[in-house]
Amino acid sequence: MNKKFSSRLGLILSAVGSAVGMANIWGFPYKFQEGGLVFLLFYILFAGIFSYVGLSSEFAVGRMAKTGTLGAYDHAFKSKNKNIGRFIGYIPLIGTFLIAVGYSIIVAYVLKGFIDSLTGEIFLKSSDIWFESFANREHSVVIYHILIIIITLLTCFGGASSIEKTNKIMMPTFFILFLVLAIKVATLPHALDGYKNMFAYNPDNLNIRTIVNAMGQAFFSLSITGSGMIVVGAYIDKDEDIVESSVQTGFLDTMAGLISSCVMIPAVSVFAMDKLAGPALLFVSLPTILNNIRFGRIFAIILYLAVVFAGISSLQNMFEVIAESMTHRFEKLTRKTVFISLGLLVFLLGINLETIDSFGPYMDIVSIYIIPIGASIGAITWFYVLQKDKLLAEINLSAKRNYGQKWYKIGKYVYVPIAITITILALVFKISF
């Protein structure tokens, strides 16, 4: 099994594939339309900080430990002669598993949207009735659920090689398809009003809520969860400039959110629809819009196919994180055994969560209580537990410029406090990012 990415392009596309998901497709546009230019500017600021120090530190720790979550925490704590890291790593790893359970259901919904676009069923009834026909009915997406898990597993068996190959196809396709959609939406009457709303500066939006939305959205859009990006780092070659690759990943992830917004926000504006977030945006608003434009069925096929690709690439990362960690910790386990067991567990736990009334609250619990805690544990571990010289040595390995005190202080005194703040806000105010 190949355990290294063969090129920088493969690395970046795999990292972008891990990061780009529903947070970009429906989370970013919703918060962008609420906060306008203020949200965008703060998002870019936070995404820049998180890419520069947060993402790069996870990449560095993964490459240093040469493995995923469990081994990385063990390695970090052992640099201070402590064994507690052997157990702490399970917290973010469990978070990754739990988010995969709910995420597989969301992608199953999207696959149904794609199939129903192909058959035309999505346009045979009003979009809200179509959505309710499966979102409120138990076990209505079982077949799609199974297919998504099988497809994800098939893209994971070869390790870094298969992940890289699939993302070299899926990520460019995602961007191209969404650009096609964005161009189509731009030609619709009154689309300009949607763009004006997107980029308008409203002084009323300069408030704590908008800033917190931008901060949380940037943090979780980049998948800096104290787990997800470590395994990407484990597959990075020693010749790669980690910080440069991290910044490029952050840039492309931000572009994914912007392109999605250029599809979603003007389209909703054109048809004077209410602002919607989450599944309703993708499964109620957009089908209504697509049903009322020329070649809408073709564009529906394009849209849902692009989102399926984004969803599978994110699930791929979640599965790989767990498999790499478990086979590293328990050497007698094979990757195939872990993946098959993982697929079965994800399906069996998710099968009774397939209605939106079930998986919605489930995902809120995971994203409020578990993922932020894991992310904070990761940030604290890299900058307060792992020896500073070891982290800087890995960051500067093959770097085109030297990253020293300035980089480290931004991580320790800016990034870590922000990660802790997000966790506190999530826990105290029940904010779901």
Image (cartoon, rainbow, N blue to C red):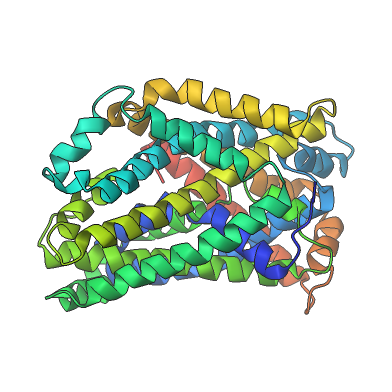
Farthest front residue in view: 119
The picture places residue 172, in percent across and down from the top left corner, at 51, 67
**Please, is residue 208 above or below residue 103 in the view?**
below
Closer to the camera in the image, 238 or 49:
238
Q: Which residue appears at 68% of the width and 61% of the height?
A: 56
Is 131 on the left or on the right of 208, as rendered? left
Residue 351 visible in the displayed image: yes
**Which of the 4 quarters of the picture holds residue 331?**
top right
Residue 278 location, x and y as percent?
30, 46
The residue that appears at 48% across and 38% down in the rendered structure is 148
- Compared across the picture, whether 420 is left or right of 128 comes to right
Q: Residue at x 60, y 55 (%)?
A: 166
Name the spot of residue 156 as percent of width and height, x first. 65, 43
Asked whether 39 or 353 is in front, the reply is 353
How many numbered discs? 0
Up-down: is 372 above or below 382? above
Drawn side of residue 186 relative to residue 75, left or right:
left
For the residue pair 381 and 342, the one nearer the viewer reads as: 342
Question: Which image quadrant is residue 74 in?
Answer: top right
- Quarter of the image holding residue 208? bottom left
* Residue drawn at x 21%, y 39% as measured from the top left: 131
Q: Position of residue 178 (x, y in %)?
A: 37, 66
Q: Is residue 109 above or below residue 309?
A: above
**In this rendering, does residue 383 appear at all?**
no
Left or right: where does residue 155 sit relative to residue 138?
right
Q: Identify whether 176 is placed above or below 412.
A: below
